[in-house]
Image (cartoon, rainbow, N blue to C red):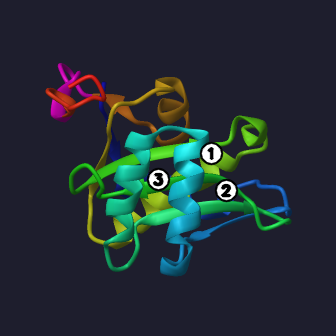
Amino acid sequence: MDMLVKLYELPSLSTIMLSKTIQIRRALAAEKHLVVAWVEKVFEVGWRSEVEVAFAHQPLAVFIAINDEQHIVGFAAYNATLKGFLGPMGVDPAAQAGGVGRALLLHTLHDMYHSGYGYAIIGGVGPARFYEKTVGAIPIPDSEPGVYAGLLTDET
């Protein structure tokens, strides 16, 4: 299922309560190989493909969460599958407590808003309740499999 978010009604970035040991920032082009390798290792190869596309935009459409040891603990990308789509996005399971996902989501959606989007589509949502609670996302009826219909797989 896909979900729709009103970008003009987002919670302020000042509402983010995040550990001082975690930093959210836009990824740098020189970090592409590190970020995409981490995404594939922690999540899946398909997400790697989408993140590579998001790295091709100017400005880059990839945000990362890094800890005080300079290790990636989460990422969010947009304009990868289609323009106006948020995702993929993920946080290392060991780092999911503490607001990392919320911080990544808000930074990325605010960036989309400041890039000229009024709405964002979160594609192929996993944790729908998280998106509903955090940014007021609503389900888009009949959106599964949506743009992912006919997606090639390893068995294709």
Residue density around tag 1, few if under 14, some if 14–19, many if 20 or more, within 10 Å = many
Q: Look at label 2 and name its amino acid.
A: Thr
As measured in the structure, the alpha-carbon distance from the residue carrying label 1 to the one carrying label 3 is 15 Å
Please give the range of residues in magenta: 140-147
Dot 3 or dot 2: first in sequence order is 3
Work out whether 86 lies above or below 141.
Answer: below
- Rendered residue at 60%/53% (across/down): 38
- Rendered residue at 47%/31% (across/down): 132
- What residue is shown with label 3? 10
Q: Are marks 3 and 2 in contact (CB under 8 Å)?
A: no
- What residue is shown with label 2? 15
In the image: residue 138, left or right of residue 73: left
Q: Look at label 1 and name its amino acid.
A: Gly
In the image: residue 6, left or right of residue 108: left
- Rendered residue at 78%/37% (across/down): 94
- What residue is shown with label 1? 101
Under tag 2, what secondary structure? helix
Q: Is residue 11 visible?
A: no
As measured in the structure, the alpha-carbon distance from the residue carrying label 2 to the one carrying label 1 is 13 Å
Residue 112, horizontal then vertical, whole percent? 36, 63
